Image: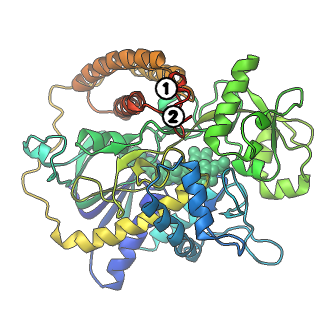
Amino acid sequence: MPQFDFLVIGSGIAGLSYAAKVARYFEQTQQDVSIAVITKVQADETNTKYAQGGIAVVWAESDSFEKHIHDTMDAGDGINNREIVEIVVKEAPERIMELIDYGTRFDKEHGGAYDLAKEGGHSDHRILHFKDITGAEIERALLAEVSRHKSIQIFTHYYAVELITQHQLGATIYRYHDDIKCFGAYVLNRKTGQVEKFLAKTTLLATGGIGNIYQSTTNPTIATGDGIAMAYRSKGICDNMEFIQFHPTSLYQQGKKPSFLISEAVRGFGGILKHEDGSTFMEHYDERLSLAPRDIVARAIDSEMKKNGVDHVYLDVRHCDYDKFLEHFPNITQYCLDTGIDIRKDMIPVVPAQHYMCGGIRVDAHGKTNINFLYAVGECACTGLHGANRLASNSLLEAAVFGHKAYESAVAGFAGAVIPDGIPEWDDSGTTHPEEHVLVTEMTRELNSIMSNYVGIVRTNRRMKRAYDRLELLHKEHEELYKESKVSVPICELRNMINVAYLVLKMAMARRENIGLHFNSDHVGDRS
Ligand code: FAD
Ligand code: SIN
């Protein structure tokens, strides 16, 4: 069975930037280490790859760290961890320079200076981007960087099922036990169907988002909250799970999953939200109009849709300079054209869709979870940066900064990590291959419906109570199925999504005030 010094679960910006740094450190100090990066499908199929708008950094002379800190805290409704916000904002230029050193290209103006875009909630131009496919460019450069290091082995089509802790050695673990240790993970080799034991001295969860608990999401199908659910089942602490970010402008295409994103940078470029008759509405909600922070814009659209009984609103870019638009947004322009929308003549139909999880596994300023030798970085982690709502383009940045923080801490603590003897193989005795795949499909549909209808942009006490009762039943039914089945990716993903949905709901029900992305209409007036 494989044994590694470092196990990295996830090959997006968080996992790859951490792995590259760990590898480089040990090369420079001339020590041999082994680093495994596992990913549930091919290496580049990540939320990272789909990022459009870009990565936020204070770069312009007119800008300042203080302004970026202020904007981040303002979007987060003030419950961000200010110390973390300062760290991320101030370390951003250094981390961005590293991405550039790895070969990441960002668009430049004709004079050679970087072209800085503006997005909702930002008081200055500070978004570095590569056309409208920034994430794909970062992912490409990071995979190239990782491939330069012999100590890193990438395992594609390997699916992490469960973390290994003392629990597997027979110990009873209590929720706030302060001496839980992680020794790696049980991992399903999707090609052989066997669960393998990946032992590791240090493990990083970089498993990304949770979008697929909802009916419509901009996230690819891999985003099923696996890391958060695995950590939670191993008694990891999670925070801020009620703060689900809905992106205001996904392309309206009924029944299409994932939803195609129309980047916020399009509104930064001059795109205006409108009704079918051309009238605007954002002036009724926020003085920043179409460029207000996402929670405000998404709620405004939701309210307008309900008021007018329509399925979507429009984004109008017909007045924008087409050549410049095309240069900046070639992917969006082409995608629209492929679906019959000519942005020179037609307004773009848009609707909010789940986009980002602001909460996640609680980590400290070094990316450490409450479980020893277990780190979490990127969208699956909750650092305190985002507070109650993430500022646009701050998440790629957070992953790069915390990839660095976790690397520093992990290499410093490496000498103390020991894997105990006697960790058992995966036990699937008494289980069989399930014959009824329809059960998983139907349960997933039910889960999506519960979350979208009752725990979406606008919540109420009654909706959440209904969601809780339905989810309890779904959880019970699925646990029975899980216990009698040989592990498969669909069954595990559904289990994880039910666990994550429960955390979202539990924290939403516990929140007694309207703040950031959590809006319960029974609490109107309580800080809303
Ligand atoms: P990901 O990039 O999602 O990587 C997750 C990895 O974990 C994958 O390799 C996956 O296979 C692996 N994984 C998950 N579960 C398992 C398992 N059980 N076993 C093995 N492997 C597993 N943010 C910005 O800052 N700027 C933007 O412009 C921007 N645009 C976006 C546009 C879209 C359409 C989307 C969806 C998101 C956007 N975001 C943007 C958000 C940002 O892309 C993500 O938050 C960020 O990329 C997450 O990176 P990550 O490394 O944490 O996770
Ligand atoms: C976008 O391009 O609108 C996405 C930006 C983000 O999610 O940060």
| Of the pair 102 and 513, the residue shown nearer to us | 513
Amino acid type, label 2: His
Amino acid type, label 1: Val
* Circle nearer the N terminus (1, 2): 1
Which x, y percent locates residue 380?
Answer: 41, 48
Secondary structure of the residue carrying numbered label 1: loop
Mark 1 or 2: the one toward you: 2
* Residue with the mark numbered 1: 455
In the depicted structure, whether residue 446 falls above or below residue 40: above
Rendered residue at 80%/32% (across/down): 281
Q: Within the image, what quadrant is residue 440 found in?
A: top left
CB atoms of marks 1 and 2 within 8 Å: no
* Residue with the mark numbered 2: 518
| Of the pair 440 and 385, the residue shown nearer to us | 385
Task: Give the distance between the C-alpha atoms of the residues marked 1 and 2, in whole angstroms.
Answer: 9 Å
Which label sits on residue 120? Answer: none
Q: Within the image, what quadrant is residue 29 found in?
A: bottom left
Q: Within the image, what quadrant is residue 36 found in?
A: bottom left
Quadrant, the C terminus: top right
Query: How many circles with numbers are drawn on the protein?
Result: 2
Which x, y percent locates residue 304?
Answer: 73, 25
Disc 2 CB within 8 Å of nearest ligand 2 atom: no
Which x, y percent locates residue 15?
Answer: 42, 59
Rendered residue at 75%/44% (across/down): 287
Which x, y percent locates residue 31?
Answer: 27, 81
In the depicted structure, whether residue 53 falls above or below residue 360: below
